[in-house]
Amino acid sequence: MTNTPMLLHFAEDLTQASGIALAAGMNLAAIARHRFPDGELKLRLPSALPPRVVLLRTLDNPDEKLVELLLVARTARTLGAQHLTLVAPYLAYMRQDMAFQPGEVVSQKVVGQFLADLFDAVITVDPHLHRVATLAEAVPVAQATVLSGAPLLADLIASHLPQALLVGPDEESAQWIAQAAARHGFDHAVCHKIRYGDRDVQIALPDIRVQGRCVVLLDDVASSGHTLAAAARLLLSAGAASVDVAVTHALFAGDALQVIKDAGVGRVWSTDCITHPSNAVSMAEHIARAFH
Amino acid sequence: MTNTPMLLHFAEDLTQASGIALAAGMNLAAIARHRFPDGELKLRLPSALPPRVVLLRTLDNPDEKLVELLLVARTARTLGAQHLTLVAPYLAYMRQDMAFQPGEVVSQKVVGQFLADLFDAVITVDPHLHRVATLAEAVPVAQATVLSGAPLLADLIASHLPQALLVGPDEESAQWIAQAAARHGFDHAVCHKIRYGDRDVQIALPDIRVQGRCVVLLDDVASSGHTLAAAARLLLSAGAASVDVAVTHALFAGDALQVIKDAGVGRVWSTDCITHPSNAVSMAEHIARAFH
């Protein structure tokens, strides 16, 4: 047993895990996973672990994966791990950061503390934080590291559409859009959004000329796709030459991809934070660099 | 706000919750539950809670429900609860109580400690414990209460088949079968079981005459149904007049119910620890009595 850190991963995440381990100089080991007919998980880790262990697990389908994290982290401590880092390229439960009605569960706070009880450090990409300023407030670990998919997506957009107009679907994306745009001098703007329900959103276009422009809608996460679809329809009605979509987190719940295709969106690009056919850029080297 | 204890439940558990609350003299309140398109849960509790709060949640589909328990228990403490009891008629993750291979996760220990960190007391029915003797070893809370469905199932069997031969599908059920049998003087015996995989089991009948007998297979849990089906086939081949099944926990994963029907099983009876069309007896009064 050497002191080289070990990156633990599940079989389906082998590609991302290999990329990170190679770039960060870590050993790589898979966690064996079996689901019993009754829905319980059986997991097996390597029988001995070095002092520093990193677990790669992105948190789409969060409920199932939070239980995996509990089982893996508690067991890793008994097998020799002294410092545990969670790499969760997509971090779930970050949006519910206050009780809008009395009695409402503030999931961000509960899940954040749950993760902080299990791990010493957390690395994530573009967490969806609204009313808290830093990841460490949401996930109170000793080291909370935030990376962004925006620069990689901006580079990708620049290679395809050097004259693109970057549009954010809502005000929350303003700072993020500005950063991505600055990297290549893109024109940019953000829409105004009013949300009536999970799948019921209303969008107003920004006061900018879109006629004849190749527009790229840039966002941190695509979930139901309804916000992106509404924005795409408005942009095309206003005369945009094309509308493509670039997102860090390709959740695309249910028929979301079809919803945005039906709205006239051409290409869809995403980072590999969540495995999806739209993945066009890999976060592996950025994540590996966070360990240096 | 009175000091009367409050029983919290989810909408689908209203029937069981009402029965318990009525018999135990508790107030009843539902937890509002919404699932976002991205798979995250939003929960809302009553805005103020009395000092003593009881949560009813049976733990089939355990991964999803363990996250619910985390969210509810942590939030209940912030809303006034000082003493939290979990009533989990079916308690998941109790079977993996040792590492059969190095590195294997001992889920019972991890999940047991997780529950003990959230709750002050746990009440369950017929937990599937092998190598630990008491529930308190598996779930180290101050008060760990075990109830049994066997007496109620024995009474039900006696009302339908006073001359029944009770058969346990494996040695693990021996003590349980003996208790149920003693209540009404039933003949009884247990099979010998060798397990090769989740759905691959081999059964040997006990050395007892089954020719012409009305047999009831009695077990704590029916999961894949393969053990019960194998036992039923052997019993019918050996000349049993009929084979019915009675279980505390009607998990019946996937096509399990069809599997045992195809094996020639007639009636299937269960307690309401897990909601299922086979539910024939209610545990509500037994559970309520545990609070006295």
Image (spheres, coloured by chain):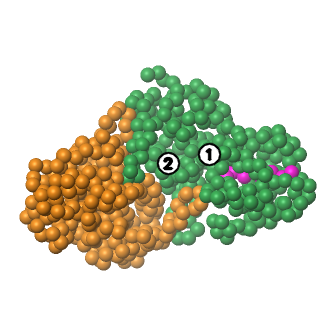
Chain colours: A green, B orange
B198 part of magenta stretch: no
Q: Which chain letter goes with mark 2?
A: A
Q: Is residue B112 left or right of residue A110?
A: left
Which tag, 1 or 2, sits closer to the chain's start?
Answer: 2
The residue identified by callout 1 is A274
Indicate the quadrant where residue B155 lies. Answer: bottom left
- How far is mark 1 from mark 2, CA to CA? 13 Å
Which quadrant, please, contains the C terminus of chain A?
top right
Chain identity of mark 1: A
Looking at the rendering, the stretch of residues picked out in magenta corresponds to A214-221
Q: Is residue B239 visible?
A: yes
**Which one is nearer the viewer's eye here, A1 or B248?**
B248
Neighbours of disc 1 within 10 Å: few (<14), some (14-19), many (20+): many
B157 on left or right of A26: left
For residue A65, which numbered disc appears in the image?
A: 2
Residue at 44 percent of width and 71 percent of height: B11
Horizontal side, residue B240 vs residue A183: left or right: left
Q: Position of residue A181 (x, y in %)?
A: 82, 46
Q: Secondary structure at mark 2?
A: helix
Nearer to us in this view, A151 or B107 = B107
The quarter of the image holding the N terminus of chain A is top left
Which residue is nearer to you in this view: B152 or B93? B152
Q: Residue at x 50, y 38 (%)?
A: A10
Q: Position of residue B89 (x, y in %)?
A: 31, 62
Residue drawn at 41 percent across, 74 percent down: B29
Q: Residue at x 26, y 71 (%)?
A: B281
Q: Is residue A272 above or below residue B119?
A: above
